[in-house]
Each structure stands twice: as C-alpha cells, then as structure tokens.
Amino acid sequence: MVQLLLDALGGDARETKPGGKVPPFECYHVNSRLSDGIADIGQVRSGKLLLLLKYCLQAIALRFRFGVENFYYVPANAARAPLYRDWIVLGLCRLFFKKVIYHWHAAGLGEWLASEARPWERRLSRWLLGRPDLSIVLRPFNRQDGLLLNSKRIVVVPNGIPDPCTRFDEDVRPRRLARAVARQKLLAGETLTEHERAQAGGDPHVFRVLFVSLCYRQKGLFDTVEAIALANQKLPCPDLRIELTVAGTFWLEAERGEFERRIQQPDLQRGGPLVHYRGFVSGAEKHRLFVESDCLCFPTYMAESFGLVLVEGMAYGLPLVTTNWREIPDLLPPNYSGVVDPRSPGQIADIWRRYLGLDHDESLRPFFLNHYTVEKFAQNIRTALAGV
C-alpha cells in the first residue's frame, strides 16, 4: 500500500528524469524495511536497530538536501516492540520536520495504549508520537487511534488496489454463471451434460472455498476448517461436496502442526481430502485460485485495520463470508448476507449450504469498481495530503 501511495503521488522525485513530467507531490522515499519475512516481524534483534538508525539518518539527510518539510510515517500495530521502534524514529526525526503525517495501516494502538500500556509508556507515547498534523485512517472505526494521540486532523481514506481481474466479464463471469446454474441443476436432481460440466470448469459438484491470508487462529483459519467439516455433514445433495483451499504463511509453527493434524482427521477426508494447503501464493497462482474458487472466507476476529482480501474477493465477484467484527461489514455492499459472528463455524457452514443454490451475485464486482480501485484511492489520498 505504501508503494501504491508513492505511485499515486508521482513516485520518488529522485527518479524523475530531467525534462520529465513534474509529479503532483514531491516525494522522497526511505524504504525502511526491517523484517526479512513473516516470522521476523515483531522480533527484536540488534541488526534491526542499526537498520532503523540508518533509515532515520537517510530521512534527516533528505530533509536538508531537498528541503523536505513533511514527514510521512506508518505507525506501529498494538505491540511493544513496534511501538518502541516508533519512539526511536519519531524521537530522532520529528524535530527536523515542520509537519508530521501518520497513515494508520494497522489498527488498535490507541485502544492498546489506553487499556494495556503501562502509565509511563502511555505518557512517553503521547510525548513522542502525539499531535500529528494529519492522521489518515482506513475506516471510521480507526479514528480512535488518531484521536488518542490528539491528531490535529483525521481523514478517512479507504485502501484501493489495481484491478486484479480486468477480463472479468470475458473470462470469469461466464464461469461463475455456469457453475451456479450447474449446482442448481444438481440440487434439483438433474443430470448435467458434458458441455454443461465443461462450461462450469469440469467440477461443478465441488463448491470451492478459498481462505487466503496470514494463517493464524485469529484470522479465522481454524473456524473455517471446522466449518468445512460441519458443512459436509449435512449437504442437501449427495453429489455435492465443499472443499477448502488455504493459501498463506503460518505465523506460529505450533498452529501449523495443529492445522496439519486436524485436516487429516476422518471428517475432513470424505472421498478424498476436503482441505488443501497451498502455502504462500502470489502472481498467476493467486489469480488462478481467485478465479477457480466459488467463495472467499475470511472470518477474522483480529485487529483488522481494513480487510484488503475482501476487496480482492469483490474484484473477482466472489461470494464472501466474513464476520461482524468491528467495521468489517462496512466494507461490503449494504446489508450483505454473508456476515457471521466471530468464532462461529456453524454459521459459516449454514451460509455455504445456502450459497450452493444461489445465482451468481452481480453486486460485488460493481461495488469494488465504485469504491476500491487504485484510481479512487489516489484521488482521495491526494485530497487528504493537499489539506496539510
């Protein structure tokens, strides 16, 4: 998302060719990556401190070399190690810049400071991080993070992404329609012709659920797995089955072991595996999974700041199942029916069984195009920053 923001503002000014188009904003980017991968995020090691100091010196050097007056920063999530990182960055850099802008891609720091932080941590955070000139938040619910740090101004700018499925009408929508019709015929006890099966991808009797996220309990991974077992116990037609594909990296090795043991149990091995693990996916493989799936399941109860995977699902016209956790439902079309309570595998299974007999949902793809494209994001972020 930081890269998309940089693109929306015209890119790094140091990369502008002489005589080239002048970007709308003059940006200088310090790529302050500290972690080597998922497992390294939140881990404390001396090498990170040295990197952090290097990045701070780069930012200060840009301040004096190019006269940069505004400091843009992505604050920490609700945990001590990243919060202490922010103390170092703002403690070193803030004095050199006239205005500070926060872009809250994580959520919950304000709540954590109010409820779990030690009194001295709370006071130090407000001193070092407080009173930014602008806080950009992704949803109205996240305003509390900016409010607790006494932001002078708070603006809501939803994330947007490049359209990952530009040939939806040509390649994907016909498949979704054909699979919905084929399942309805199977539910009615009718026999499909070979042509109908081919149009529906060859396996319309398999309702394919996709879970693509960090593989973590609070993201709803294990609730999704349990829902697969429950849903297949009471299918309305013996010719149908519901299978799950899991794509993502495990945060905890213990949870990976628990997951692998669970999916080998007999209730998830009916006529072959009902759960398939693909690991981390990207590019063409990720696109293929979104195209070939019949539903996206993301029953999170984590401190989500946005839920970008739901936006991706809408871009592919995928029926969604998610939770009424915080403001997650506000991402979806009004009164969307695929919303369940957190930690409710039974409710998830009921929705999947209902989805088996429904027509293709024509509302999701247009909702994405109207609200979450990268063009709308660029427009909104420019307006927000111009106000500073």
Image (tube, rainbow, N blue to C red):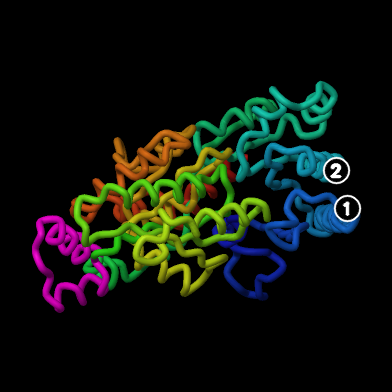
Q: Residue at x 59, y 45 (%)?
A: 385
Classify residue 188 as left or right of residue 332: left
Q: Could you say whether the residue bearing mark 2 is in a helix, strand or loop?
A: helix
Classify residue 164 as left or right of residue 148: left
Looking at the picture, does residue 182 appear above or below residue 255? below
Which quarter of the rendered picture does the N terminus lie within? bottom right
One can see residue 94 in this view: no
Q: Which residues are magenta?
A: 176-204
Of 338 and 233, the residue lying toward us = 233
Judged from this view, the residue extending furthest toward the front is 266
Could you tell me residue 37's position as x and y percent? 70, 61
Q: Residues within 10 Å of mark 1 (few under 14, many from 20)?
A: some
Mark 2 or 1: in front is 1
Magenta span includes 307: no
Q: Are marks 2 and 1 in contact (CB under 8 Å)?
A: yes
Q: Amino acid at mark 2?
A: Ile
For disc 1, the marked residue is: 49
Give the CA distance from mark 2 to mark 1: 9 Å
Q: Residue at x 73, y 38 (%)?
A: 79
Q: Residue at x 63, y 26 (%)?
A: 147
One can see residue 56 in this view: yes
For disc 2, the marked residue is: 88
**Among the 4 quarters of the image, the one containing residue 239:** bottom left
Q: Amino acid at mark 1?
A: Leu
**Main SS category, magenta section:** helix
